[in-house]
Amino acid sequence: MEETISLKELMQVLRKRLSMIALITLGAMIVTAFVTYFVMTPVYESSTQILVNKASDDQTMYTTNAVQTNVQLVNTYNVIIKSPSILDKVIDELKLNMTTDELNSKIEVSTEQNSQVFTLTVKDTNPYMATKIANKIGEVFKKEVKSIMKVDNVTVISKAQVPGGPVSPKPLLNIAIALVVGLMAGVGIAFLLEYLDNTIKDEQDVEQILQLPVLGVIGQIDDQELNGLHRAGKKTKGKVETVGA
């Protein structure tokens, strides 16, 4: 016999476990907020933009081939700018206490499709250091590419600025995610506990689980009501004896 669960029964389960679901959700949000504000280290990013522009001796307008050549050079420069020949000089000039690989992990180079401009982004826990590194890499790259590629076609068109705030962590986003995850976990645990709970608590459980009709229900009387019944019984008995005498 197949068992079906109605929407009413689902709502009853949620109402019965509502306090537990609320506690799990609230706990997830509190833990996430604590980790976000007091454990995770803020990370800042600063970016500089570099233009690759093949010089033209006759100062004529750009041709399609010239632009395509510059776009191809961008892909090459993306590799060169993160190479040890550039980063080692940046480390020496800024006296950074890190290896080339560590500095490389802080750098991200991106470019739009068919664009002669690429963006160099540096991430660091110190916003001023991120800005200094980004500008220094652009400066060193512009100087060194002349000897590496034997060309002078690199221009820094936008210097890095000190960021106004961290890019990560994002407290509101993290807490919102914790709210959703905590709510889903609470609902899941509520239904799991309901599924594992095979105890019989009321007449509805008798009908649903044992498939038996309910003939009668014995009400539960607490101690206060029981004491009241005892006192009422004693008074009634005393009156009956008095009348009989």
Image (cartoon, rainbow, N blue to C red):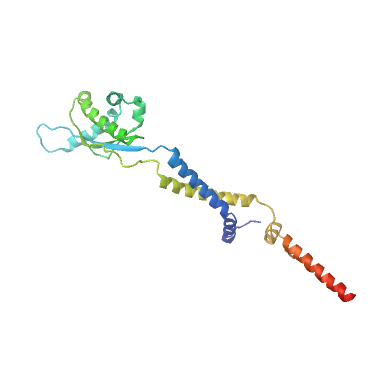
Which residue sits at x=59%, y=52%? 191
Task: Tell which of 47 and 188 is nearer to you.
Answer: 47
Is 51 situated above or below 194?
above
The structure residue drawn at horizontal position 85% and vertical position 73%, both measured from the top left corner, is: 240
- Count the marks: 0
Report x, y in % for residue 205: 68, 58
- 102 with respect to 2 (left or right): left
Image quadrant assignment for residue 38: top left
Residue closest to the far left: 58
| The image quarter in which residue 211 lies | bottom right
- Name the outermost residue toward the right: 245
Instruction: Give the residue drawn at x 20%, y 23%.
Output: 147
The percent coordinates of residue 82 (x first, y second) are 30, 29
Residue 232 visible, this angle: yes
Above or below, 211 relative to 179: below
Quarter containing the C terminus = bottom right
Residue 10 image offset from top left, x and y in percent = 58, 57
Q: Is residue 218 visible?
A: no
The residue positioned 23% from the left and 30% from the top of the image is: 139
**In what quadrant of the picture does the N terminus appear?**
bottom right
Q: Is residue 121 left or right of residue 195?
A: left
Of all residues, the one furthest to the bottom in this rendering is 243
Q: Position of residue 152 (x, y in %)?
A: 17, 29
> Could you say which is closer to the camera, residue 83 or residue 130?
130
